[in-house]
Image: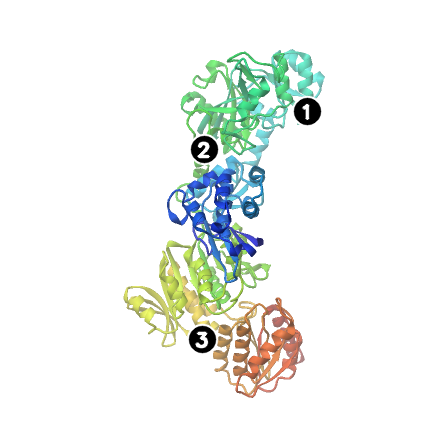
Amino acid sequence: MKILSIQALRGPNIWSVRRKKLIQMRLDLEDLEALPTNKIEGFRQRLEAMFPTMIEHRCSEEVRGGFFQRIERGTWMGHVIEHIALETQSLAGMETGFGRTRETKTPGVYNVVFSYVEEKVGIFAAESAVNIAQALVNNEAYDLQADLKKMREIREDVRLGPSTGSIVDEAVARDIPWIRLGTNSLVQLGYGVNQMRFQATITCKTSSIAVDIACNKEQTKQMLDAASIPVAKGDICVDEEDLDNTIRRIGYPIVLKPLDGNHGKGVSINVNTREEAVAGLAFAQKYSRKVIVEKYITGFDFRVLVIDNKMVAAAQRVPANVVGDGKQTVQQLIDQTNKDPRRGYGHENVLTEITVDRDTLDLLEKKNYTLETVPPANEVVYLKSTANLSTGGTSIDVTDMVHPENIFLAERISRVIGLDVCGIDIMAKNLTQSLKENGGVILEVNAAPGFRMHLAPSEGLPRNVAAPVIDMLYPLGKPSRIPIIAVTGTNGKTTTTRLIAHIVKNNGYKVGFTTSDGIYVQNHMLEKGDTTGPLSTEFILKDPTVEFAVLETARGGILRSGLGFSRCDIGIITNIQEDHLGISDIHDLKDLSRVKAVVVNSVKKDGWAVLNAEDVNCVEIAKDLDCKVAYFSMNEHCDVIVNHCRKGGIAAIYENGYITIKKGDWKMRVEKATHVPLTLNGKAKFMIANVLAATLASYLWGFKTEDIKLSLATFIPSAAQTPGRMNIFDFKKFKVMIDFAHNPSGYLGVEDFLQSIKSPHKVGIIAGVGDRRDSDIKDCAVIAARMFDHIIIRQEKHLRGRTEEEIINLIIDGIKSVDKAVTYEIIPKETDAIKHAINIAKEGTFITALSDVITNAIEVVQQHLDKEVEEA
C-alpha cells in the first residue's frame, strides 16, 4: 500500500458539514485491491487480538461486533484502515468515531476519511493505521503501544491546556466560534469586531497593571497589608545578610520562595535552621534573584477563584503524598499511586503523575527517610512542599463551605489588585471560619490561575468555572459573530462578491471581503493574489475592525481544507458549469455540485441559500437544504421561479429590462438594467445575472431596495473596482477589453456580449490552462473562433503538467474545427501579445484579451492608453 496524500480538513467539507475536523487520506491499495479481508488467512483473528475493543464498532451493520462481521464477509483494506485510525486515537485517549471510505475513479485508489481531535495526532494516526494494517496482512509483530505513546506525546505538545480548553469548550457549547492564534494558548473567541481574546486564563479585559502587581509578590503583599487584609510577615532577601536580618525579626519556622516564581518552583517550607534557610535561599535564587522569606503559617492550603469580582469556587489543595502500608517502600508507593487512571503525563488527565525531584528528597530527608524507606501503615508521607496540581497534588472542593466574611474578603482582594480572573492562595485551618478568627493569611494572588483543580477535583463537586469567564466576555445580548455572506459558483463569484461588499459598505458597515485578486477591508487591499480559501477567510474573521464579511469561496479551498467559517448567514451559488473537471476526484458536474453545495449547506437554519433557478444542478441542491431558499433568474417565466413564487417564495428576476424582486405575486422593481453600470448598458447578460444574485442577497439580509438601487448605480466597472471583469479601455480609434473568462461558460458570456458590439475587426487574445480537459481547451477555442476575426494564441503560464506545444495544438484544433474564415498567430508572452494586438489595431477594432494574469494585462494596456493621452 502507498499513501498518496494526507490532508486535514478544518471546516465544513464535502464529507460532512457538521463534522469539521477530518483527515482525508488518498491511499493506493496496490496489490491488496485484489485481496479483500476474507481472502487473507487469519486476518480477522489477528485484528481482533490486537484491537479487542473494536467489538464496539457497529459499522453499517448497526449491531455490536458489526465491523468484525464485515471483516468476516470481506471488505477492502481502506475500510479497515479507517477503523484502525479511529480506534488508535480512542485508545490514546482521544475518543472519536466518524469515518468514510470511498473508492475514487482510479481503480485501487481510495479516499479514507476519519475524524480527529488533534490534527497532528490525526495525521500520525493515518500513517500508523496503514503500517498496522500492513503488519496484520503480513502476519508480522507490531508495537502498538509505541504508537499510542507517540500519539499521547504529540497531543501534549499541541493541545490546549485544561484551563484554556475548558473556556473553549464552554464557548462551543454556547455556539461562540473560536480561532487558535498560533500554536500556544492564545485564543480568539468570536469573529471580527465582536471578538474577544484570552491566553490561559488572562483575558483581553485583564489589566496589565494588575498582572504586574500580582507577579510582584512583595508589592501585592504591601497593597493587601495596606488594605487591612491579613498577610504573612516577611521580607525580600537577596543575600545571606538579608536572610539573617529577616529571620531575627520574624523567627522560625519560615518559607522561602522566588519573588517571580510560579507553579511552586523553588519553594522551601517549614525551614527551622539557618543551614536549611541558606540552602533554601540558593534553591529559590535559581528562579529569581530576589527571594521572599515569610513566617511559615500552619494550616491547610486553599485556592479561592474570583472571576469578574465574584467568588466562583474554592478548593483545598493537598500536596503530592503517599500513604504507607508497612510493606512497600516510598518509591513503590509512588509507582502504585501513579497507576491511578486519573493521573497522567502533564495535563493529560485530571491529576498529574508524581515525579521525584530535589523538593521530594529534601522533605524525605527531614523525616530521615529515603525512597527505599518503608513507612508505617497509614502514615501520610508528603512528597512536595507545595500543593500545585502540576506537581502531583490533589484538590478537594470546598466552595459551599466558605464563610461569607471570607467570600467578601476574596472579592475585595480581586478589586484591590484589579484582576478580572484572580486566584487567591490562603493558608488557614479552614475556610468555614473567618480568617480573622482562625488566624489565616493570604499567601499570594495569582493572575492566570489554573482551573483544573476546580473543573475536576479529587473530591467534591466539579465546578464549571469557565462559564463565568464566558459570562464576563459575552454578557447576555452581546453577539459573538458577524454577518457572513459566502459566494461560490463557477463564474461570476468575484463580481458578485465585490458588488455585495459595495452595497454593504454603502449601508454603513465596515466590510471585509475576499476575492480571487486579493483580501480587502473597507476597499483597502491588504493581501494580493487568489485569496478564496479558508486562510483568507480566517484573515477577515480575525480582523478586529470588520463588522460584515463577504467571502468568495472557491472549489480549491473547500477540497483542500474545508470552509474557513463554521456557518454563514447567506450562501450564494452563481452557477455550476464545467470547469476544473478531472482534478482532485472532481470528474463531472455532479461531483462539482457536491463541492459547491458545501457553502449553502453551511447556511444557518434561518438563513438563506441564493440559487440560480436556470441551473439544474443548483435546483437539485435546493432539495436537500435545511435553510430557506431564494432563486434568481434572467427569465421570469422559468418554471422554477413560477412554482417557487406561487408558494410565496422570494426571487430576483430580470423582467421588462428591470432588476426586480418578486415576493409571491408582488413585484418590486429595483432599477432598470441599463442604469446599472456593471451591465454595460444592459448588453452584458451574465453581468445582469450577477446583479440579480447580489441584489437578492442584499434584500434578504434586510437592506432597503432604495439603498440597493443607489449602490447599483454607484458601482462602476473599472480596472480598480472590478479588475479583469469586462474592463474596457477606450483608445481614439479602437477599444480593448480585458476579461478573466477561462472556461467554456465564461467564453459564451463574452461571445454573447460581443454580439452587441459593432466592430469591423474583432481580435481575441486567448490561452489554455494545462490542468483542464482536452475537450475544455478545444471548446474554448471553438467559441473564440466564432466570436473573433483574428486570434492571437499565447501560452506562457499555467502549463500544469503539459507542454506549451501540446496546449497550443489543442487550441489550433478547436479553431480549425469551426467553419469560418478566421486567422491566428502565436505569440507566447502575454504582454507581447497585447502590445502586438494594439499595434495592428485598425479603425474600429475591438480587442478582447482573455487573461489569467489580470494585473499584467491591465498595466500594459493602461501604459499604452496613457502614452496616447500624453502624445495628444
The answer to whether 268 appears left or right of 179 in the picture is: right
Q: Say few, some or many: other residues with alpha carbon within 10 Å of mark 3 (under 14 / 14 to 19 / 20 or more).
A: some
Question: Where 752 sits versus 308, above or below?
Answer: below
Which secondary structure lies at badge 3?
Answer: helix
Per the image, the residue denoted by label 3 is 685
Give the tally of numbered discs.
Answer: 3
Q: Marks 3/1: CA distance?
A: 77 Å
Disc on the earlier residue, 3 or 1? 1
Which secondary structure lies at badge 2?
Answer: loop
Per the image, the residue denoted by label 2 is 465
- Tell me the quarter of the picture where residue 829 sits: bottom right
Task: Judge whether residue 21 can be spotted in this image.
Answer: no
Q: Nearer the viewer, residue 703 or 768?
A: 768
Residue at (38%, 48%) from the top-left corner?
A: 61
Under mark 2, the amino acid is Val
Disc on the earlier residue, 2 or 3? 2
Q: Marks 1/2: CA distance?
A: 34 Å
Which secondary structure lies at badge 1?
Answer: loop
Q: Marks 2/3: CA distance?
A: 58 Å
Q: Say few, some or many: other residues with alpha carbon within 10 Å of mark 1 (under 14 / 14 to 19 / 20 or more).
A: many
Q: Report x, y in % for residue 45.
A: 48, 42
Question: Where 708 sits versus 49, above or below?
Answer: below
Under mark 1, the amino acid is Gln
Disc on the earlier residue, 1 or 2? 1
What label sits on residue 569 in the rendered view? none
- Tell me the quarter of the picture where residue 262 sits: top right
Q: Report x, y in % for residue 859.
A: 63, 71
Per the image, the residue denoted by label 1 is 285
